[in-house]
Image: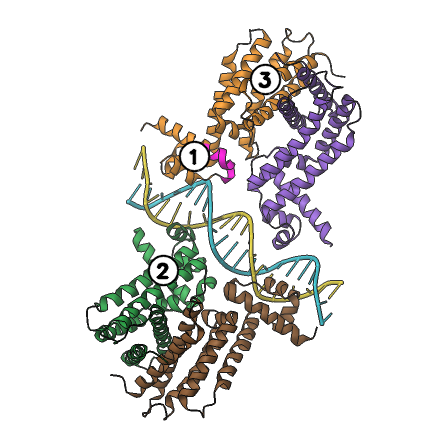
Chain colours: A green, B brown, C purple, D orange, E yellow, F cyan
Amino acid sequence: MPRAVREALILDVAGQVFARDGYHAASMDEIASGAEVSKPMVYAYFGSKEQLYLAYIDRTGGELLERLMAAASDDNAPMGALRARVTEFFKFVDEHRDGWRVLFAEAASSRPVADQVAELRGRIAALIRRMLEDPRASGLTLTQHAADGIAHAIVGAGESLANWWLEHPDVPRDQAAAWYIGVVQAAVVSAAAPAR
Amino acid sequence: MPRAVREALILDVAGQVFARDGYHAASMDEIASGAEVSKPMVYAYFGSKEQLYLAYIDRTGGELLERLMAAASDDNAPMGALRARVTEFFKFVDEHRDGWRVLFAEAASSRPVADQVAELRGRIAALIRRMLEDPRASGLTLTQHAADGIAHAIVGAGESLANWWLEHPDVPRDQAAAWYIGVVQAAVVSAAAPAR
Amino acid sequence: MPRAVREALILDVAGQVFARDGYHAASMDEIASGAEVSKPMVYAYFGSKEQLYLAYIDRTGGELLERLMAAASDDNAPMGALRARVTEFFKFVDEHRDGWRVLFAEAASSRPVADQVAELRGRIAALIRRMLEDPRASGLTLTQHAADGIAHAIVGAGESLANWWLEHPDVPRDQAAAWYIGVVQAAVVSAAAPAR
Amino acid sequence: MPRAVREALILDVAGQVFARDGYHAASMDEIASGAEVSKPMVYAYFGSKEQLYLAYIDRTGGELLERLMAAASDDNAPMGALRARVTEFFKFVDEHRDGWRVLFAEAASSRPVADQVAELRGRIAALIRRMLEDPRASGLTLTQHAADGIAHAIVGAGESLANWWLEHPDVPRDQAAAWYIGVVQAAVVSAAAPAR
DNA sequence: GATGAATGAGTTTTCATTCAT
DNA sequence: TATGAATGAAAACTCATTCAT
């Protein structure tokens, strides 16, 4: 079996185990045997448990980011882009439950891991910030900090709503997405009208 | 030293260690020696590592919830209550960094822990839901699900904004609280006007 | 069983295993089970394999050095002191075969270990150097370096002869000691009369 | 690349690694990649790690022995031969630091290795013994054992002095050699005059 | 002849947990 | 009540060694 295929397979299994047990409780033994590979192979391919985790986050986070960016170009009317991206986001969560859980339900691991997740979050927040700062969205300019903070708040709302939705399977995906769009739109407006 | 005092002391130390290392990486040895107690005492008082963790979450989460509820009675005008509670929330985060980190930055541990944190989150969401459903806030009634989901989104926004604020110490606490209030108000309105 | 006794027992067993297998090939598992102790106890007492090794070298080397120093005071006529010390040295080797092997037959381990052994060697060489520099032994003064180098040569001669003797059990101990004394005396004289 | 060249190259790299890390800590992986050869090639050429080590010792020890023997024929006046050989010995150490370290600083490995090193030592000791027993050197005959033991002592002195010299680079090589010659000459004389 | 891919066995080390006192 | 001493179990990681190609 060629190396690239093995690597992808190992990452898949690692994702399942990390999602189920969390970083610390996950065991390399189980990942290796789950991928039907000996432990030394896992180490030969990924170097260490932490690097394996990082590789998984990188792959998953990279895909999420790519899909969000592909879903809409910034040139579109901001609210059209918003709708497209939120829809894409919920689709991603729906299709990659393990990846989603690992990405966002476990911030607390070793330093490099936390940093990498934080960076991903920051890049997603940047997408939102660009919308907040788009003059077509709100008539007013925000301070750097305000835009950044509010963007993070919006990201957190999405995470939380996505997790809630995963536990309420009877709610249609588009329904949840619609709620989120509403919240974001409102937040954008509220940000425009200087709070307080 | 009376038992209650010992217990509180141990919980304090446990909180620090859990916040610094996370649940799994934290060691009972360090907690015991940090509290200047022998390990068997920790076990006599709390039973197991997991139960100790639960006890800490219980104490911290309980205090948060109490403070949120005390900050405003539901009878107040909803937006007045909102302001009071958000302010109280940011005060809590500011004063209990360890507790806050343990409560929300580490959802992924063993099942009972996750459940307990989820329950706390649910109770906080319920506070918000009650506001969403208050006819004085929005003229319309929401479905159960809509109210619940949006409430969770709002909780997540708060968590995320609080974490962002902890990493931007130059932003005044009231500033961050004000942004959050804006977002919540907007979300309430958006929820009232059926999205889409 | 009190801690001190356990520690001594573990050190004894460790010495046997280290002597038989060398530092790297020795396994903590075997040392623990040989001492009828669980592995965590060994770690609780000594911290790590390397520290255990250092502790053993420290104990053994310390005893050797003490015995060499106690065997003769520097005030004695140098050659009388020499005889006493060489005799003591061969007695030590005879009685502590394991210790002897670990101390000198295995210089190559990790850095701190090599350093510690080198230091011991240096201290024994210093004993000899003091004799070389004693005006009663040789009429001439030696340079620092000459005294040091020759002292190390003499130490090496003793090590090598002791090892040779261990493999020739039919040679009486005093016989070997006598040869060594002769070599050392001759070396002292040769050092006094500047070579060449 | 012809096999013989490959083999020599591998041995060179192996020597460096063995000298740096010791037998056990050295890794076949590093040796193979250092020689720019795949691991299976190393095994095809040398069979096993131990055999590789033996081959290296064989090559290095063989060269040392050859140079010592070539440096002087036994017919020469014994003391002339001594001087020539000691000089050659220090030259060898100077030029083959890795080889020297492997040969003598690490006696403690597996049994066959120890045996091979012991044998080399014995052959060098034999060279010295022949001088000790040469009637031109000392008027008296020594017992077999005495000659052998003292010869080993002298070998040990040389090893130890060589190591000491490696750590004192400011001492000229010929200086160290001269000291050693003095010690050996004196030892020969002392052996002639029955000690005690 | 040469190698990429693979592994079984073993290493040190750590931890939650519990007796005997 | 309180603890020093002890451990079973498991984790991450490494290595010499060998096929299939």
Residue D6 pos. (x, y %):
36, 29
Residue A3 pos. (x, y %):
31, 51
Asked if residue D21 is among those painted magenta in the image, a careful observer would answer yes
Question: Residue pushed farthest right?
Answer: C76
For this view, does B27 lie left or right of residue C81?
Answer: left
Label 1 chain ID = D
Going from N to C along the chain, the mark reached first, 1 or 3, is: 1
Circles 2 and 3, Cβ within 8 Å, touching? The answer is no
Q: Which label belongs to residue D126?
A: 3
Residue at 60 percent of width and 18 percent of height: D180
Region rendered in magenta: D16-25
User: Is residue D25 something one can see in this rendering?
Assistant: yes
Q: CA distance from mark 1 to mark 3?
A: 31 Å
For this view, does C92 lie left or right of residue D34?
Answer: right
Q: CA distance from mark 2 to mark 3?
A: 64 Å
Q: Is residue B70 above or below residue D89?
A: below
- As helix, strand or loop, the secondary structure at mark 2 comes to helix
Q: Which label belongs to residue D120?
A: none
Residue at 46 percent of width and 31 percent of height: D15
Badge 1 crowding class, 10 Å Cα cut-off, few under 14, some 14 to 19, many 20 or more, is few
Give the residue pinned by disc 1.
D47
Callout 1, which amino acid? Gly
Q: CA distance from mark 1 to mark 2?
A: 39 Å
Callout 3, which amino acid? Ala
Label 3 chain ID = D
- As helix, strand or loop, the secondary structure at mark 1 comes to loop
Circles 1 and 2, Cβ within 8 Å, touching? The answer is no
Give the residue pinned by disc 2.
A56
